Image (cartoon, helix red, strand yellow):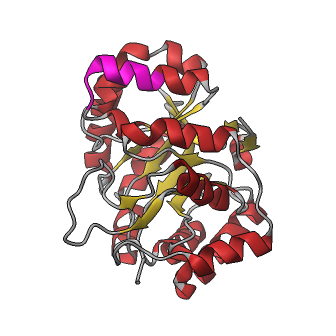
Amino acid sequence: MEKRRLGRTNHESTIITFGAYSIGKLSQDDADIAIQMCLDEGINHLDIAPGYADSMERIAPWMPNLKNKMFIGSKTPKRTRDEAWKNIEDIMNRMNTDSFDLFQLHGILDFETLDQVTSKGGALDALIEMKEQGLTKWIGITGHGPIAPKVFLESLNRYDFDTVMFPVNSIIYQNQDYRSSSENLISICNERDVGIQGIKMIARGGWGDSRKDCGTWYDPHRSQESINQSIWWQLSQPIHTAPSCGEFSLLRKVLNAGSKFKMLDEIEQEFIISNLNSSQPEPKLGILN
């Protein structure tokens, strides 16, 4: 699978990252299958968070061996320094690890939350202390929502984050305001050598009143053809890697799309954006129609 340098971290990340949300509600046996599947495909980057059900407990038996094979990225959803430190210690215990390659502020959806985490005594202080103590090499920020790119543009003015993680998706790019701010953020990140992780890779809309039959909180593409199109479009943007989706049954298709990745030219990209129809609006992602 293709690899791209994750900004100043200098890690050559596979273009698909193992998103551990997909194993959080699986048995250990099934989780082992998913982890081995990713290793067999050469995936060398793990994305995990404490809110992903039991994903940390499923990963724990594979540590520390996994640390020799994957770039380990984790997150805290806490907003104050003291709460974040308690959460970090709990994550270390749950994951059976004593350090990370990347640790991130998680779920920064708006400017009010950004103010909380970057103020004196905010969660960012804990991550800076982690780095000073050698517990993480790099510090990042993650989130989603219709103003995420604008929030992260401001975050880079407050702290020199090493990575950002936010939605980069063809159906969301029909939202012209989101697209413009997203393209601006991507450009600035590349100028500053900030690693870019694109999430919500196969979202096609919200659930609305329909029955939720997948583990993703958005309604995903399901066929190999539509997953290929969605992921190839995403990875044709100047980003570095994309965490796999939160639905285990779609993991093989996601990995297949990544291993067969074909760069799309601008005409192909615009055609995809123009011809997509969302299944249902999802305002929390910026999918308006």
Q: Position of residue 88 (x, y in %)?
A: 34, 37
Q: Residue at x 51, y 24 (%)?
A: 37
**Highlighted magenta segment, given as a residue range:** 26-35
Q: Residue at x 77, y 65 (%)?
A: 191
Residue 233 among magenta residues? no
Q: Nearer the viewer, residue 222 or 74?
A: 222
- Looking at the rendering, which quadrant does residue 70 occupy? top right
Residue 71 to residue 28: above or below:
below
Quadrant (top left/top right/bottom left/bottom right) for the N terminus: top right
Quadrant (top left/top right/bottom left/bottom right) for the C terminus: bottom left
- 123 displayed left or right of 14: left
Q: Residue at x 33, y 69 (%)?
A: 206
Residue 34 among magenta residues? yes
Q: Nearer the viewer, residue 77 or 176?
A: 176
Q: Position of residue 90 (x, y in %)?
A: 27, 31
Q: Residue at x 48, y 27 (%)?
A: 99
Q: Position of residue 74 (x, y in %)?
A: 44, 39
Confirm whether residue 197 shows in the render.
no
- 171 displayed left or right of 237: left
Q: Nearer the viewer, residue 249 or 245?
A: 249
Magenta segment, prevailing SS (helix, strand or loop): helix
Residue that sits furthest to the bottom in the current view: 177
- 164 displayed left or right of 214: right
Q: Position of residue 162 (x, y in %)?
A: 62, 52
